[in-house]
Image: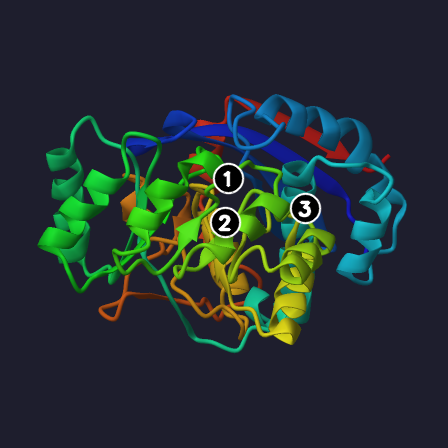
C-alpha cells in the first residue's frame, strides 16, 4: 500500500476546566493531528504535545518540524505492508516520541481500515470494555477538589486519581479518605518528590491507596527501587518508562509493581505493545494513562487498553470529562459500570469530524507524494 498524502493539523481544544499538576497548568489540549491518505482510505493519529516542554522535551512546534522534515518524506517511497515498515523508517531519528506516535497511530488506523478490522483487533485486544477512572488536578482549595470528586463519583467513576505535590498531599488524601473510605484511590506525584520526602510516603502508605504514581524524578528508575522497598503501597512508573528497555530495567530492579503505559511517551503503539508483553511475561500488571487526548488519541488508547494485561482502571475518561464537543462521532461515553466500550468498527471505529478539525486548525500542513 502506498501513502499518497499526509495532512497535519495543529489544534487547541479548550478544556471544560483547567487541569493543574505539580509542574504546570493547562487550559487547552494542544495537539497535532495526523491524517494519512492512500489507496482510497484514510487513517488518523494524534501527537498530544503541548505548548511548553514540561512533560517531556517536545512541543507542538517540534512535532510539526520533525514530522515534516524527517519522518514523513521517507514514507512516500515505501510499499507499506505493515506497521514495522514505518517504525523501521523512523528508527534513524532518535527521540521525538510524540511525533512518532501520531504517525504510527495514523498508519495503523489506515492499515486496519484496509483489512476491515478494528484497531483493537489489530493490536491483539481481547476486551469489549475497558475499566476507567478519572484523574483530578490540583485545585485552589480542598473543598473545590472535594466538589469535583463528588461530581465524578455521581457520574459513575469508580476510581479516583488525585494529583499531589509537596504541601498538597497528606491532608488532601486524609480529607478524601474521611469522606470516601471505600472508594478506590490513587495519587500521582508527577515526579515532584525526592527520597528525603520518605515520611510523606510513609504517611500515605497508611491510607489504602491503589498506587502511588511517579513519585521521584522523571528519568529515575534506581531511586524508585529504594523507595518501593520502604512501602507496602505499589509504586507505578510513568515518565521513567520511555521504552521496552526501561521496562525491563524497572522489573529487574523491582522499582515498581505496575507500569503506566502511554503510547505517546513510548514512541507509539508498537513500543507500547512490546512493554505490555514484557510486563505480562514478568507477571507485572500494566494500566493505561492519558495525555488529555482528543477523541482521536482517546479511542486509540481505548483500543490499546483492550489488551489482556491491563489490570487496573485507565485514565481514559469519557469525552465530556474534558471537552464541550469532541472531534469524533460518536464521542467516548462512560458506561454504568465505570467502563468505556472498545469500538468495533474498522480502524478507530469512529468518524473524525473533519469540518470541526478544519475550523479548529491554527496551522494546517499538507505533504504529498511527488
Where's the C terminus, which quadrant? top right
Q: Secondary structure at mark 3?
A: loop
Q: Residue furthest bottom?
A: 126
- Sequence-wise, the earlier of marks 2 and 3 is 2
Can residue 98 be seen in this snapshot? yes
Assess disc 3: are there few (<14), some (14-19) or many (≥20) residues with their C-alpha within 10 Å of its C-alpha. Answer: many
> CB under 8 Å between callouts 1 and 3?
no
> Residue 340: which quarter of the image?
bottom left
Which x, y percent locates residue 12? 44, 27
Q: Name the residue at 62% across, 21% down.
A: 61
> CB under 8 Å between callouts 2 and 1?
yes
Assess disc 1: are there few (<14), some (14-19) or many (≥20) residues with their C-alpha within 10 Å of its C-alpha. Answer: many
- Sequence-wise, the earlier of marks 2 and 1 is 1
Which x, y percent locates residue 117? 60, 71
Label number found at residue 216: 1
Q: Name the residue at 74% across, 29% down.
A: 66
* Residue with the mark numbered 2: 227
Where's the N terminus, which quadrant? bottom right
The mark lying in front, picked from 2 and 3, is 2
Of 301 and 239, nearer the camera is 239
Question: What's the distance in space between the residues labelled 2 and 1, CA to CA?
Answer: 9 Å
* Residue with the mark numbered 3: 267
Of 9 and 201, nearer the camera is 201
Please indicate whether residue 367 sits to the left or right of residue 355 in the image.
right
The mark lying in front, picked from 2 and 1, is 2
- Sequence-wise, the earlier of marks 1 and 3 is 1
Which x, y percent locates residue 283? 58, 74
Please indicate whether residue 184 sits to the left or right of residue 63 in the image.
left
Amino acid at each position: 500500500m502506498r501513502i499518497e498524502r499526509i495532512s497535519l493539523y495543529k489544534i487547541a481544544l479548550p478544556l471544560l476546566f483547567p487541569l493543574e499538576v505539580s509542574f504546570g497548568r493547562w487550559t487547552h489540549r494542544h495537539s497535532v493531528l495526523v491524517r494519512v491518505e492512500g489507496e482510497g482510505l484514510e487513517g488518523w493519529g494524534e501527537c498530544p504535545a503541548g505548548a511548553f516542554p514540561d512533560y517531556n522535551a517536545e512541543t507542538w512546534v517540534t512535532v510539526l518540524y520533525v514530522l515534516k522534515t524527517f519522518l514523513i518524506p521517507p514514507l512516500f517511497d515505501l510499499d507499506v505492508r505493515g506497521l514495522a515498515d514505518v517504525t523501521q523508517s523512523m528508527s534513524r531519528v532518535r527521540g521525538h516520541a510524540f511525533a512518532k506516535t501520531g504517525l504510527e497511530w495514523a498508519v495503523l488506523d489506515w492499515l486496519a481500515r484496509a483489512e476491515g478490522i478494528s484497531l483493537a483487533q489489530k493490536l491483539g485486544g481481547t476486551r469489549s470494555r475497558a475499566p476507567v477512572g478519572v484523574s483530578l488536578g490540583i485545585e485552589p482549595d480542598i473543598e473545590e477538589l472535594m466538589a469535583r470528586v463528588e461530581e465524578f463519583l455521581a457520574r459513575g467513576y469508580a476510581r479516583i486519581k488525585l494529583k499531589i505535590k509537596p504541601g498538597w498531599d497528606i491532608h488532601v488524601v486524609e480529607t478524601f479518605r474521611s469522606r470516601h473510605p471505600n472508594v478506590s484511590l490513587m495519587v500521582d506525584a508527577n515526579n515532584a518528590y525526592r527520597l528525603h520526602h520518605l515520611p510523606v510516603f510513609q504517611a500515605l502508605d497508611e491510607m489504602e491507596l491503589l498506587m502511588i504514581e511517579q513519585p521521584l524524578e522523571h528519568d529515575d528508575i534506581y531511586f524508585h527501587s529504594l523507595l518501593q522497598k520502604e512501602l507496602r503501597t505499589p509504586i507505578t512508573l510513568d515518565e521513567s518508562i520511555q521504552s521496552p528497555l526501561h521496562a525491563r530495567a524497572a522489573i529487574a530492579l523491582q522499582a515498581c509493581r505496575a507500569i503506566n503505559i502511554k503510547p505517546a511517551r513510548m514512541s507509539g503503539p508498537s513500543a507500547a505493545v512490546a512493554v505490555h508483553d514484557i510486563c505480562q511475561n514478568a507477571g507485572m500488571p500494566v494500566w493505561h494513562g492519558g495525555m488529555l487526548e482528543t477523541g482521536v488519541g482517546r479511542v486509540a488508547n481505548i483500543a490499546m487498553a483492550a489488551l489482556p494485561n491491563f489490570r487496573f482502571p485507565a485514565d481514559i475518561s469519557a469525552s465530556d470529562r474534558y471537552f464541550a464537543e469532541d472531534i469524533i462521532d460518536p464521542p467516548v461515553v462512560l458506561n454504568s459500570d465505570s467502563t468505556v466500550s472498545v469500538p468495533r468498527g474498522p480502524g478507530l471505529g469512529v468518524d473524525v469530524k473533519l469540518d470541526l478539525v478544519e475550523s479548529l486548525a491554527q496551522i494546517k500542513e499538507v505533504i504529498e507524494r511527488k
